[in-house]
Structure formats: structure tokens, C-alpha cells
Image (cartoon, helix red, strand yellow):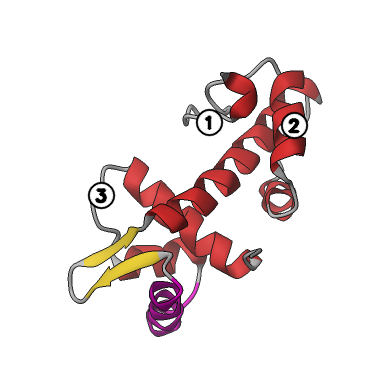
Amino acid sequence: MPTSESVEEYLEALWVSEERGEKLAHLTWVADHIGIAAPSALEMLKKLEKEGYVIYKTRQGIELTEKGRKVAKRIIRAHRLTEVLMKEALKTDIQEETVCGMEHHMDEKFMDALCTLLNHPRKCPHGHVIPKGKCCV
């Protein structure tokens, strides 16, 4: 079942929090990262827990489930490949608004084709790891 862009933004934020070394993401950090109020973030995270994307531990934090991690990995991969496309292949400045708009509309086949075109980059221009796809094996 496809996820909404809003859901994907939350899962992407949780992935980034993990990359920063946080075992559990803090609610306030997630809210700040997405740019919304903490009560709104809490409401959405509780919905995501009911849908099996996250585990919410009251007063401790939030973590991705395998289901959530799968979606987050796809979004992170699309985001970072698009950044490489803009910076390295197109020789343009990275436009985050454009990147964020595109990342939600790529399927695996398109991402694998883009990754192959870009010679399977391992890091984005910001130095973050790009998750591997089937094409990278």
C-alpha cells in the first residue's frame, strides 16, 4: 500500500535520527526536523505506530519498525540520488525543495536506473551514505 508524503517525511526523519547515532528519536527533534509543533507530531507518530511503521515509547522516543525502515530507506535513497543527479550530473546547485518533491514519486525501477546512470554513488554530496538498491549488487 502506498504511503503519503507526510508519512514518508516522518519515516525519513527517523532514519536521519538513527544515522545521527540516536537509538530512539526524540519527539521534539522529529517535530523540529519536519517543522511542525510537537503535539501534531505526537498525533501522527501514534497513527504510524498503529499502522506498524514505528514503535513509540512514552517519554523515551520513537524507533522505526522493519516496515517503517523499508519505506524510509526508499525515500532516503531517492533523496540522495537526486542530490547527486543535481550536483554531479547536472552541475546545478542542490534545490532541497525540488529534491523533496521528487523523492516521493520515484519507484524502485526508476531509482535503480538513476543509480546505474550515476555509476552507483555510495555517498550524497553532503557525505551521507546512499542505501544500495538491487542494481548495486
Label 2 to label 1, Cα distance in Å? 15 Å
> Given the image, on which type of amino acid does mark 1 rest?
Ile
| Residue where numbered disc 2 is placed | 86
**In the drawing, does residue 78 fall left or right of residue 107?**
left
From this viewpoint, which residue is outermost toward the right? 90
Going 36% across and 41% down the picture, which residue do you hit? 19
Q: Position of residue 32 (x, y in %)?
A: 42, 66
Is residue 43 one of those drawn in magenta? yes
Q: Residues within 10 Å of mark 2 (few under 14, many from 20)?
A: some
| Residue where numbered disc 3 is placed | 22
Q: Position of residue 126 (x, y in %)?
A: 52, 31
45 is higher (above) or lower (below) than 96: below
Dominant SS of magenta comes to: helix
| Residue where numbered disc 1 is placed | 130
Mark 2 touching mark 1, by CB under 8 A?
no
The tally of labels here is: 3
Between label 3 and label 2, give the one nearer the viewer: 3
Between label 2 and label 1, give the one nearer the viewer: 1
Q: Position of residue 124 (x, y in %)?
A: 57, 28
Which quadrant of the structure image shows residue 61?
A: bottom left
Q: Residues within 10 Å of mark 1 (few under 14, many from 20)?
A: many
User: Along the line of sight, which residue is nearer the eye, 87 or 13?
Assistant: 13
> Given the image, on which type of amino acid does mark 2 rest?
Met
Identify the mark nearer the N-term, 1 or 3: 3
Q: Which quadrant does the N terminus fall into?
A: bottom right
Identify the mark nearer the N-term, 3 or 2: 3
